[in-house]
Amino acid sequence: MIKTVPHSDTFDPGAGRGLAILGSTGSIGTQALDVVRAQPGKFRVEVLTAGRNADLLIEQALEFKPNAVAIADEAQGQKVRDALWDHDIKAYAGQDAIAQLVEMEGIDIVLTALVGFAGLRPTMNAIAAGKHIALANKETLVVAGEIVMAAAREKGVDILPVDSEHSAIFQCLAGEFHNPIEKVILTASGGPFRGRDRASLTDVTKAQALKHPNWEMGAKITIDSASLMNKGLEVIEARWLFDVKAADIDVVVHPQSIVHSCVQFEDGSIKAQLGLPDMKLPIQYALGYPQRLQNSFPRFNFAAYPSLTFEAPDVDTFRNLQLAYDALERGGSAPCVLNAANEIAVAAFLRDEVGFLEMSDVLEHALAAVDHVAKPELEQLFELDQAAREAATDRVKRS
C-alpha cells in the first residue's frame, strides 16, 4: 500500500524568492523567465546558466541582472565575461562552475532545466546546500533517484516536479497525504507517430520526428516523445518522486494533452489535473509553491475540446517504453545505463547516423554490454554513465 507524504512546510512562500535557473537559454529556462516577467516582485533571479548559447545568456543577464552567470562551454567564457564586466554581474565558465554556483547564498530554489545526465551533479550540490529543487531534469531521478531523494529527505529539501505529468500528480496529491493511493496514471500524447506500425517507421526522418503535435520543446525531449522514451523516463521519475512501484504506474495515450496525469486512490476514485498544453503553468506552480499565483495564461474551454480520448500505448512498436519499465524493475545501474545510451542514440539520430527504430537497438546493446551493479554509489554512476556511452557509441558506429 502506498502512502503519500506531505512536503516540508519550511519553504517560505513570500515575495522575492531567489532563483537559480540552470539551462536558462533552453525551452524550460526561457519559459521560466517568462513567468518571472509576468510576476513582478515575486521572484529575483540570482543565477543563470547556459550550455553554449552565449548571446542569449548575455541578453538574459542584462535584463534580469543576476548575481552571477555561468556558461558550460569554456571557449565562450571570455565572451560572456567581457559583455558583463561593466554590469556588476559575475561570469564563470565550465561544468564545475555551474555545479558550484547553486550553493550561493540568496538562492531559495534551483530550477534544474539542464538536458540529460549533466543535471545530476548541480542538483546534488544544491540539495547539499539546502536549496529547494524545481526539477525539470528528469534524468537526475532516472539515474540516481534513490540517492537524490534520500539526500533531499536528510536536508529537508523539497523536490518540486516541473514536468507537466509529475506536476499534475503532485497537484492531485495536495491535501491527500493521509490517503493511500492505488496507482498513478501518466498520460502521453503519443507523439507524431501515434498509430503507426514498425514497418511505416523504418524511414522516418528527424524533421518528421521533431514535429510534436501539441508541445513546443527542445530537440532531445521531442525525439524522446516520438519514441515514447520520454514517457519511459517519466515512469522511472514517478517511481522516486511518489514512492510507487513500477506495477503501480500506468501509461495511457491521450492525444489531446489536456489531462496531464491522474491519481487513483484505494477507494477507486481518480483525480486528474487538466489544462492547456503550456509548460508555463507547471513551471509557475513549482516556483511559487505552495501558492497558486494569479496569471493571464490562456484558459481551457471544455466546449473547444468536445472529445477527449484515451488508448493503450503500443509497446511493441515503441519499444523504448517497455525497455524503461524493464530497467526500472531490474533497478541498480540499469536506469543509468538506459539513460546514457538513450542520450547517445538520440544524438546519433539527430545526426542521421541511426534510424528511428534503431535507437532501441542501441539501448539494448548498452544494457547488455555494461556490467550490472545492484546498488551503485553516486560516484559509480558517473563511471557507469561513461561506460554506457562508450558501449552505445560502439553500437552506433556499427550501424
Image: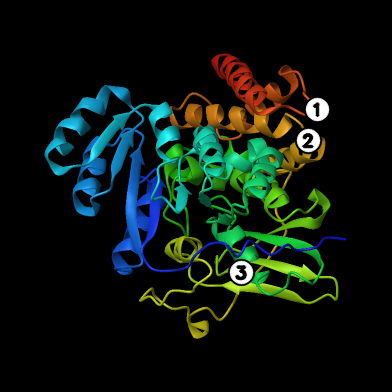
Q: Amino acid at mark 3?
A: Gln
CB under 8 Å between callouts 2 and 1? yes
> What residue is shown with label 2?
331
Quadrant placement of the N terminus: bottom right
The number of numbered discs placed on residues in the rendered structure image is 3
Reading the chain from its start, which is encountered first: label 2 or label 1?
A: 2
| Residue 135 shows in this picture | no
Please tell me which residue is depicted at 74% across the width and 69% down the height of the picture: 177
Q: Where residue 203 appears, x then y in whole percent? A: 53, 35
Q: Quadrant of residue 195?
A: bottom right
Quadrant placement of the C terminus: top right
Q: Is residue 10 above or below residue 392?
A: below
Q: Where residue 245 appears, x then y in whole percent? A: 81, 51
C-alpha separation, residue under disc 2 versus residue under disc 3: 27 Å
> What residue is shown with label 3?
171
Q: Where residue 32 appears, x then y in whole percent? A: 38, 57
C-alpha separation, residue under disc 2 versus residue under disc 1: 7 Å
Query: Front-most of 277 and 335?
Result: 335
Where disc 1 sits, the SS reads loop
Q: Could you classify mark 3 by the number of other residues whose Cα lies within 10 Å: few (under 14), some (14-19), or many (20 or more)?
A: many
Q: Amino acid at mark 1?
A: Ala
Where disc 2 sits, the SS reads loop
C-alpha separation, residue under disc 1 versus residue under disc 3: 33 Å
Reading the chain from its start, which is encountered first: label 1 or label 3?
A: 3
Q: Quadrant of residue 255?
A: bottom right
CB under 8 Å between callouts 1 and 3? no
Give the side of residue 396 with respect to residue 174, left or right.
Answer: left
> What residue is shown with label 1?
374
Q: Is residue 378 above or below residue 47?
A: above
